[in-house]
Each structure stands twice: as structure tokens, then as C-alpha cells.
Amino acid sequence: MPLDSIPPAEYQTLNGSRTVRVTPKNGDWRDSAAISVHDSTLTIAKPRYPEYDTREYPVSYRFDELESVSTIKHEGLIYVESGVEHGSNHGAESQFFSKNFFVIDMGYLSGERRYHEHPRWGFGGTLLIAASDMDFRMGAKGRVRYRLNPHLSFDATAGPMLKSWNDGLINGFVGGVNVNVGSTFMLRSEYMTYEVSPWRDASYNYSSGYTYTQYPGGYEKVWYNGIAFHGTMGWVTASVGSFALVGFMIAALASLGGLD
């Protein structure tokens, strides 16, 4: 946790809502955003996260009883989650529909630190990247996380699917829920609607030649379900998966070049 030590000469200025960690000489540290100072005595009115710190409050310390007082810097996490999803389309037929996507979520989530005192609620946003051998998609999702305990939490996400500025930017919707188990593993389920343009499929028969089928386009409607990793494993999976997709695309292009 990032901390900035406060010189003892400045303890008198700590009245207010400044978020600090108070470490007495004869006890464990306490985090608080509600403190007051009077007559060389610092009083902690309540803990920063009452759901985790159930010790008795308020509590007071004389300045000479303090080992240190430190400012807690703004804390959050730029995180990566990566994995695979599988789904079936129940909407418009698409020329490039992908049953399987390699997905990466990259974004910010408040309260996600490596220490145990996570707040119950976390808020943030996610950039979704979904890639396969058939398609590449992006979306922007808001995210809310509820932490039931240090080992189990739940996410709700929702936001627009994106395309180029020239084509109107928004191309559909994505929203879902995640179940996070421990600090590494998650189960994902999300609903994606994605607009597809009208297209024509050609088939060839030796006796009749080419025949064409016209598809009107519309919106894919897919529930994707899968697994993903976050933390260190999320970064590793994202890196390995990205390199694998690039390698597959290079191989596919080389194969097409060989056919020519």
C-alpha cells in the first residue's frame, strides 16, 4: 500500500477527512478517514473500513505514543483479466460469427489492493477486447464489484460495443456478471448484441454453377460464457493469447499467399 510518512511537527494539522494510517508504539496500525487533533492528542473516530476493522472506536493517542502517521495515497488498480468465452447466436446470421472468443478486459477498479482490507464495494470501468480467427471487437463497460469476503466477489458490467468514429462509434451492447474466486480465477457470463451488415453467401455446384443467398443483417444476440484469470495469471494469459493470435494470423496469411 502506498504511504507517505507525515513529520511529527505536522500532526497538529491533521484535523479533517484526510485518510491516514496511524501506527502506535504499542499496538497494530489503524486506517481512518475521520480523525481529530486536540491538545497533542490524536483521536480516531472510526475505522476506514468498519466491516473489516471491528475494534473499539473512538480511540485516542498522545503524540508521544505514536510510532508514525502516514498519508494513504489514492488506491486502485489498473488490472487485466483474460480468458476464453463460448456462445451460440440467437439473432441475425452473421458472415463472421465467432462461437469462441479470446477476451481481455483492461481497466480500473477501486479498492483492489493486495492487502486484506478491501472495501465492500468497488467501482470502475473496463475496455473489452474480443478476438478470434474470424473477428475482432471492442467494448467499453462500467463495472461494479461487491466483495462478499476476501475470497469471493461478484461483478456486474454493462456498456456499448464500439466501432470506428466514421461508422457511428456504438455498434451494440455488452453486459454481464462475473464470479471471482480467490485472487486469480473467475467465471464469466455476458450477453452481447452486435450489429452485422447485410451480406451475401456464395455456394458452387458443378451442375448449376454459383448460387447466392442474401442475408439481411441485423443484430447477433449471444450469451457468452467462459473462464478468465486476473492478477499475475491474467497478464500472463493475455500475453500468451495475444502472441498466439498474432502467430495464427501470420500463418493464415502465409497460407493464403502460398495458394496464389
Image (tube, rainbow, N blue to C red):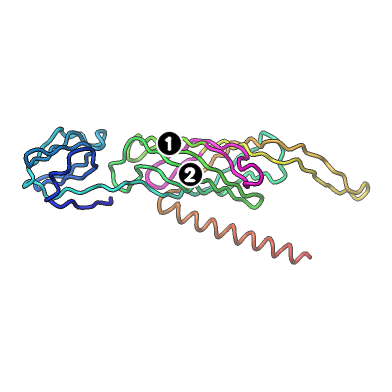
For label 2, the crowd category at 10 Å Cα-Cα, with few meaning under 14, some 14 to 19 and many 20 or more, is many
Residue range in magenta is 159-188
Residue 173 belongs to the span the image colors magenta: yes
Counting from the top left corner in percent of width and height, residue 55 is at 17, 35
Q: Residue at x 37, y 43 (%)?
A: 182
Counting from the top left corner in percent of width and height, residue 176 is at 51, 35
Which sits in the foreground, 24 or 231? Answer: 24
Q: Residue at x 19, y 52 (%)?
A: 5
Q: Residue at x 24, y 33 (%)?
A: 50
140 sits left or right of 68 in the view: right
Counting from the top left corner in percent of width and height, residue 26 is at 9, 46
Q: CA distance from mark 1 to mark 2?
A: 10 Å
Q: Which mark is residue 55?
A: none
Q: Amino acid at mark 1?
A: Val
Which sits in the foreground, 251 or 57? Answer: 57
* SS assignment at label 1: strand
Pointer 2 residue: 126
Quadrant of the rendered image containing residue 14: top left
Q: Do callouts 1 and 2 mark residues in contact (Cβ within 8 Å)?
A: no
Pointer 1 residue: 144
Counting from the top left corner in percent of width and height, residue 40 is at 7, 42
For label 1, the crowd category at 10 Å Cα-Cα, with few meaning under 14, some 14 to 19 and many 20 or more, is some
153 sits left or right of 246 in the view: left
